[in-house]
Amino acid sequence: MTHYHSLCEDFAVSVHLKTKLDLPTGRETVLHFFESLQKSFPRMVDFERRDNGEFCLEEDRESGSYRWVTMESRRLSLSYVNPPQSEDADTTFERILELAPAHLDLSALDVEALDVVFAFDFMYAGNHDEVVAEALAVGSPFEPLLSLPGSKVLNFEPMIVLALDESCRLQARLHIETRTNAYQVRTGQYPESALSVFFTVRQYWGKQPTASFVESYRQQRRLAVDMVDTHIVPQVIRPLAQAISAR
């Protein structure tokens, strides 16, 4: 998993645990939970409550490789940006998923879904949508539209969601997020910004047989790695990186 960073500017792996009921917001409960995380990961020292009400604990972002945890009203999010080794991300997520149920009074009945997300960021000062179309739409039925005289691509953000089991409770989602707007295309002034590729494996909770959040993470992570290595890297990431570098 760590070799993904060589394909882009920044690579991150994240876990999102979505709940049906509101997570606790009491001072004692929140502080006790984040203090337990800090004991496990001493470099996580920056704690704050943001204007939108979410709590956040993170490491120094200037280091280039850092972890963060946020707790929203109905979502617990964990992320590791540019993990040095695959094992570092696994150890972090598994430890937090072990701690969270007891500290936050989480149960399988309350959980809506668990997401494992791989994110690839490319820094690019240009028309994001145009370069995505160039990398992924050439040779497709979309190519004649992209070649219309005088036309410019304003939005091209492919997304696909696949059901991976008969119940449709295990899903995979590929989404490309561009950050170019019509003003930039009109003026030709493009600031450098991140063009992102997200690949998510989501397990809806309830009737699935996994015994714990940790076991589900491990299964989803293995599935994500297999699909990314087999399909996403050769068919999406490499063509996109090549299209950007050629400009």
Image: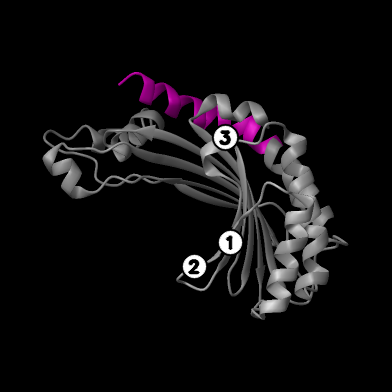
At label 2, the amino acid type is Arg
**Does residue 245 lie above or below 100 as drawn?**
above
Distance from Cα at disc 3 to Cα at disc 2: 34 Å
Name the residue furthest right.
211
Q: Which residue is drawn at 16% across and 38% down?
A: 151
Q: Is residue 123 found inside the magenta-colored segment of the image?
A: no
Number of residues whose C-alpha sits closer than 10 Å to that of mark 1, classed few (under 14), some (14–19) or many (20 or more) = some
Colouring mode (rainbow / by chain / secondary structure / one colour): one colour
Disc on res. 232: 3
User: Looking at the image, is mark 1 or mark 2 earlier in the sequence?
Assistant: 2
In the image, what residue type sits under mark 3? Answer: Ile
Q: Which of 168 and 51 is in front in this view?
A: 51
Q: Quadrant of the N terminus?
A: top right
**Mark earlier in primary sequence (3, 2):** 2
Q: Which secondary structure, mark 1? A: strand
Label 1 sits on residue: 56
What whole-number distance in Å separates the C-alpha atoms at marks 3 and 1? 31 Å
In which image quadrant can residue 141 be found? Answer: top left
The percent coordinates of residue 181 (x first, y second) are 24, 48
According to the picture, the residue beneath numbered tag 2 turns out to be: 50
Q: Is residue 152 left or right of residue 52?
A: left
Which region of the structure is painted magenta?
A: 226-247
Residue 233 left/right relative to 85: left
Viewer can see residue 24? no
